[in-house]
Amino acid sequence: MVSVSSCMNSLRDRGQCALIPFITAGDPNLETTAAALQILDRSGADIIELGVPYSDPLADGPVIQAAATRALQHGTKLENVLEMLKIVSPKLRSPIVLFTYYNPVLNRGIDTFFQDIAAAGASGIVIPDLPLEEVEKLLPAAAAANIEIVLLVAPTTPKERLEAIAAQSQGFIYLVSVTGVTGMRTKVESRVQELITELRGITDKPIGVGFGISQPAQAKQMMEWGADAVIVGSAFVKRLAEGSPEQGLQAIETLCRSLKSAIAE
Amino acid sequence: MTTTPIPSQAGQSASNPLDQRPDALGRFGQFGGKYVPETLMPALAELEAAFYQYWQESEFQQELNGLLKDYVGRPSPLYFADRLTQHYARPDGTGVQIYLKREDLNHTGAHKINNALGQVLLAKRMGKQRIIAETGAGQHGVATATVCARFGLSCVIYMGVHDMDRQALNVFRMRLMGAEVRPVEAGTGTLKDATSEAIRDWVTNVETTHYILGSVAGPHPYPMLVREFHHVIGQETRSQAMEKWGGLPDILLACVGGGSNAMGLFNDFIHDSTVRMIGIEAAGEGADSGKHAATLTRGRVGVLHGAMSYLLQDQDGQVIEPYSISAGLDYPGVGPEHSFLKDLGRAEYYSVTDQQALEGLQRLSQLEGIIPALETAHAIAYLETLCPQLSGSPRLVINCSGRGDKDVQAVAKVLKMNEL
């Protein structure tokens, strides 16, 4: 499996900005999730973020909350998500980054969790409620399983903290572009440009910008401001949930292609 | 009232685990910590710094103590419950001597105002003009709406739709005082869901908003600072006990949802090893029924709303929707310090059912002319189990944490149905 950092680095060497779509596993069902991963993979995704549904998604806005609730109502379990991923991941070119809250990790046992997700073919992980202070105790287990832990920085993060997080983050640095939860917004905040510039002054690691980005023009704007990757979540999750699974898959393919062409030069 | 000593910060000897509550990372042993989105981390650090700064300032203490006295009506009485004591007396006249710490007599009718007042004074000093809070029974929401009215701050309260229905009186009180009550429909529409929504609001508006968290739960520094703002409960109890019988209480008894009234009572006595501390959780339809909120009795260690603590969760680590007739105890988590005290064996935790709580509520109403809140009724109800186990005539203090006016309609409905 390709690591997140080598994927990001080779794109950067070629002067390309990465597209990272996000979908919630199990919404509307895991068969559709499996199909969606393959469609995204061949429609311009460079890395795919796969959300593990959780009962109390604190960092998520209404679209992803609702998707997680539906997935759980259909009986989606981490076990099934990993079984699906094990079958699909060998067919994918894009590394998979799991997005999960901390409690399911803790509940499975930290060592077991990382071994299991690695065995299923994941390359990285984002844990939105696990701040820098708590990450340290996960590092040995993650390293042993070859899983990269991507850390988040926010507009409210002070400079010294940015430096500490940037030093620790693996794969790329996930810049949360808004003070807020995930979800589509009509405008991107102009201060994102300053945040990218500030972060660029601190680290050579790739910077991925997410939260609030849904449209090709916004993705392009991020690329022009210096982002190495653009992460789009709710816009995919919403499309995949509308109409039949076939219509949803069609819609995310269209979105993925248009986002990719907006950031491909 | 004297100034509470500042909780120990980093670097002190950890020979007695009870000396570090919490440690520098906000941990009580393995419990507590800060499991929140990065966006909130600077705000938590700011809040912690503000607390340590102002808590030591005499100007802050004077303002807080002045308001606690003249606005809240403190000190709250320590009342000897004569007929309740007689009810549990043995034939020879010996038996548990039951005292009630009358937090129900505070302005707004519960202990919650102590914390809301303390936090609003911090918020004012931090320059925050907008206040948000979560509420279950509505007592914390009412307390927050009250202090916001008192200080002219804008106030948004998140409340589950189910709780809005069963605590309609409190919804009206909050609105009357100018607060906006935002219904939360997610999950079962109870306290857990309201808390999640309040945290999402805070993530979004953190630069202008202070979140008055209502229990000794959530990320550090909340469990510590909420406890300190309720510390006055135990502090008064100690001096009132000294006045009344020249000694310490033998047993402290309080209900536990998140656990703020219990921590407020326990905290001053943590190092008095002769004082037995008992917390009572909500067993709903029974701790084995699957419909309960008995987190410490039935939970496993997990992370919810920013803290590591005992948690009601399924095999997959998904949080289980709790159940209790009492909206204030209907929560799948518990304050991390309670988990710590449980594991250390310093405090004991048991649970009583809806039915037992309803009986407790009626018993206190009929024997003492005090209608307790349904939350408080859980602690009252445990006397049925506890009293027969005790020998001699130990002095027991129950935190009478809230009054029951808010519950009478819901209780009337149930009692009629059961023809009790």
Image (cartoon, rainbow, N blue to C red):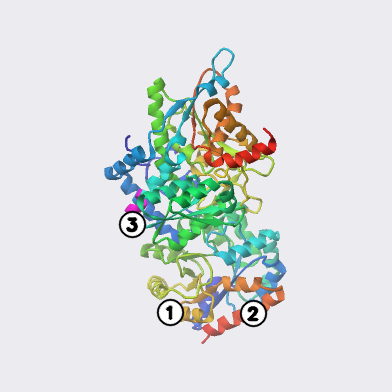
Please state the horizontal and vertical placement of residue B326, each as a whole percent of the image: 58, 42
Q: Nearer the viewer, mark 1 or mark 3?
A: 3
Real-space Cα distance between discs 2 and 3?
Answer: 48 Å
Q: Using the image as rendered, state which of residue B83 and residue B275 is in the foreground.
A: B83
Left or right of residue B151: residue A184? right
Q: Chain of mark 2?
A: A
Amino acid type, callout 2? Glu
Q: Using the image as rendered, state which of residue A166 and residue A240 is in the foreground.
A: A240
Residue beneath the point at 71% across and 73% down: A244
- Name of the residue lying farthest toward the top: B92
Query: Callout 3: helix, strand or loop?
Result: loop
| Residues under numbered marks 1 and 3 in contact, where contact means CB atoms less than 8 Å apart | no
Please state the horizontal and vertical placement of residue B141, each as a whole percent of the image: 48, 49
Q: Which residue is mark 3?
A: B127
Q: Which residue is mark 2?
A: A253
Q: Which residue is mark 1?
A: A225
Amino acid type, callout 1? Trp
Q: Is residue B411 magenta?
A: no
Please state the horizontal and vertical placement of residue A246, each as a whole percent of the image: 71, 76
